[in-house]
Image (cartoon, rainbow, N blue to C red):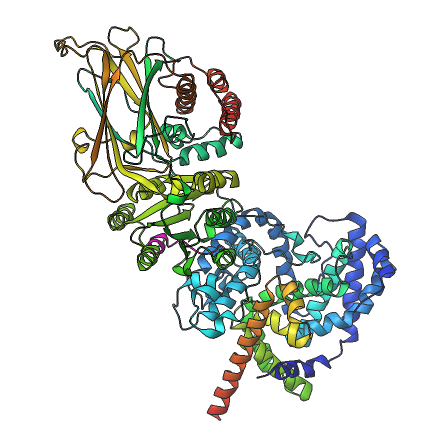
Amino acid sequence: MTDDDLKSLFEGVDRIEPGEEARARARQAALAAFAGKNAQVPQGNVTPLRPTPSSNPLDGNGRSRMNMSKRQWLMGGAASAAVVVLAVSVVMKIGNPPFEPRSVLPVASEGTAPKPAPPEEARRDQQAQLAKRQAENAAAEREAVAGLAKGQAMADSVSQEMGSVASAPAPTIAQPRPSAPQASRKMVAAAPPSSAPVLAEVSPPAQYQEVGRDRFEAVDSSPVKSVATEPVSTFSVDVDTASYSFVRRQLNQGVLPQKDAVRLEEMLNYFDYDYPLPDSRETPFKATVTVADSPWKPGNKLLHIGIRGYELPRAQHPASNLVFLLDVSGSMNSPDKLPLVKQSMGLLLSQLQPSDTVSIVVYAGAAGTVLEPTPANEKQKILAALDRLSAGGSTAGGEGIQLAYQLARSSFKKDAVNRVILATDGDFNVGITSNAELQGFIERQRDEGIYLSVLGFGQGNYHDQLMQALAQNGNGVAAYIDTLGEAQKLLVDEASSTLFPIAKDVKLQLEFNPQTVSEYRLLGYETRALKQEDFNNDKVDAGDIGAGHRVTAIYEITPAGAASGLLEPSRYQPQQPAAEGHASEYGFLKIRYKLPEESSSRLITTPIPVDGGELSARMARETAFATAVAGFAELLKGGQYSGNWSYQDAIKLANSNKGEDLYGYRSEFVQLVRKAEVAAAMK
Amino acid sequence: MSPDRQTLEKARAGDAAAFAEVVDSCYASIFRFAMKYTGQRQDAEDVAQQACIKLAHSIASYRFESAFSSWLYALVLNCARDWHRQQSRHRADTLDEDCGEAVADSADESRVYLRQVLDEVDAMGSGYRDTLVLVAGEGLSHREAAELLGVKESTVSWRLHEIRKRLASAAMQENGHD
């Protein structure tokens, strides 16, 4: 078959002249419509002067066709609002069986002919029709590419999306998809040429947006504990920052975040406090403890533990073997998701050394390798691979993770940081979807030296809980990227923290002295609590610290004898006289950690004096700002323990302790508190 | 297929005579396109009429941003798709019609063959029929067709490649049976 053969098909038909009668009829109808339109200018798709039996003597078949189409137009308007959601779900469904698109597209339209359909069904039918039209462009393209993968994985909708890349072996495949830059394809009705008037009647929203399905784990704040009964507090460090970015995003939209989205420790650790640096690389971090008065409860004290990790000079950066695992499922089709992912990965690329390797794995309905391990100096190649990605299909996240680890293993470098970086909105709905199973898998990989970091994107359907669990089990950071600015902070300014661990399984244990402290409460870290006996058990996993990371933990304590406590003394338990001789200490801090390549832990200990002497101005400022952040988080969580302390107090405290604030994050924090105040007032 | 700019301006402004002129100058091309798309005179006439009515409604929204002909293509193509969708709902009816129709002359014969081909191409999925008609039937370039269909140029090329392959293999099968 040649092009000419195809053309000749139409030759016979081309010679057919239009019938005069039909031409006159059409002309008349058009003129009538034109006159009618200019008389009353109807809205959108209503066509007041449609051919009727009187004006348009068509045969019965034709007439019923007309009537039906009229009904459709009318229904169309009503249905168009609902269509968006439907169009999306249709498109997402299409993903799976690539070779029978017709059966996948709304089947409802086949049998449910015009008359007998009950209204509800007819309505749905109309929606399906419209959805079909909207989906057509996207679907058609997908089919086109699906053809490429013929003979390869049948249900592989990733290779549908990534056809040219994923199924590279077949030589013909690259041809129909040249490396032409691919504009990010809108899922809903790829916009036709600007001049096309016809699609204007269903004006689709620009993007896919889900609302109200963000999932967070509900955790109660840690309660006030009595030193007499429970003098020891144990927890693992946490360097995640996801909660802060998510909260920021919500507040920027003028709404208070849901309480479960607020994790105090992640808000606290978002900021780079200027704690003293460790002296040498031998002890990878230094802990500084300060005690200050509690701003929200006179009498109480706040005990700050500030940890700062060793900063790796750029020359000492270890090599990296990174696998980007990117979610390209339909749910990622939104400007703040996949496009932001691409930009973020591009940023990260700029921080890599030439010898580092990067691979890209994507998953949608299935998983596929987009880029084999490639040295970072072939930047164009990597960027081009990123650029080609587009979103569509369901989400086989589990499979993607497995493939990513496989790739990381294949390019495993012994002395390098081997890390999978997962970028997703957290919606795993195909394959291994059981959280426990995924975690187990990641845990085993971690023990083999491949770490996992999780970057969360998008909102409306953000599955925070899973993201947290994955990153915690993978010795990585869980961060949430809401803007390019956040990507810049995380992947450029703090790239070394994000990429290079300097200590792992870092656990803190604080024993309070009942002589000097009667009650204590740990602010945040609820999800990081450990059992007392886990502290010395090196088998128990805990959080990691990257190069230059800051970790802050705050305890609110009630000194013995102060009246600000919440707990009543027991009527029946006799007060144990505390051991003598330590009246000058609030408690004793122990930190256990492992160096990244070691499996047995080391211990750092330091007593916490009651009178720590005068704080340096710098430490006073840093702790005060941390207090403002913690207090703000408490307020967002409902202000259970913060008394009458208000947003205004937080603003005041933060404002007077901003310090240099080179990057403006602290100023932004003050703005956020203001927004929260407004949002709270409007609630 | 292109009325002059002045006439178009007038028609946009609501001048009925000018609009009639536009319809007169375009009807033949509209009909021919519809004929190629549907492969049947009666259906083509229906589609063409719908297109004319649609033209009446949307001519005011033509802003001279692109050639009138490609604007019109988009419009007619959409009417043709609407028809096609209705038609596939009534597939049974149409098939009956087809069988009842007598093959009178060579033009009819080519029409019947075209319909068979179009049916075959339909089975490959949506978008293939549009592509075939625009490129092979109307002689548009791959780029122009891609723009109209809102897909990438490579997709158009690919579809045509697939169509040729499909038709070739269908022809081979037929020969094999003979």
Quadrant where the N terminus of chain B sits is: bottom right
Residue that appears at 29% across and 6% down: A563
Percent position (x, y) of residue A38? Answer: 80, 51
Q: Is residue A396 magenta?
A: yes
Q: Is residue A213 visible?
A: no
> Looking at the image, is A118 positioned above or below residue A292?
below
Q: Is residue A7 magenta?
A: no
The magenta-colored residue range is: A391-401
Percent position (x, y) of residue A135? Answer: 54, 58
> Looking at the image, is A343 positioned above or below residue B48?
above
Is A526 situated left or right of A267 in this image? left
Residue that appears at 79% across and 58% down: A32
> Looking at the image, is A252 positioned above or below residue A84?
above
Residue that appears at 60% across and 52% down: A76
Q: How many marks?
A: 0
Specify the quadrant of the image occupied by residue A359: bottom left
Closer-to-camera residue (A537/A528): A537
Toward the bottom, the furthest residue is B178
Percent position (x, y) of residue A358? Answer: 41, 55
> Looking at the image, is A374 positioned above or below residue A292?
below
Q: Is residue A354 visible?
A: yes
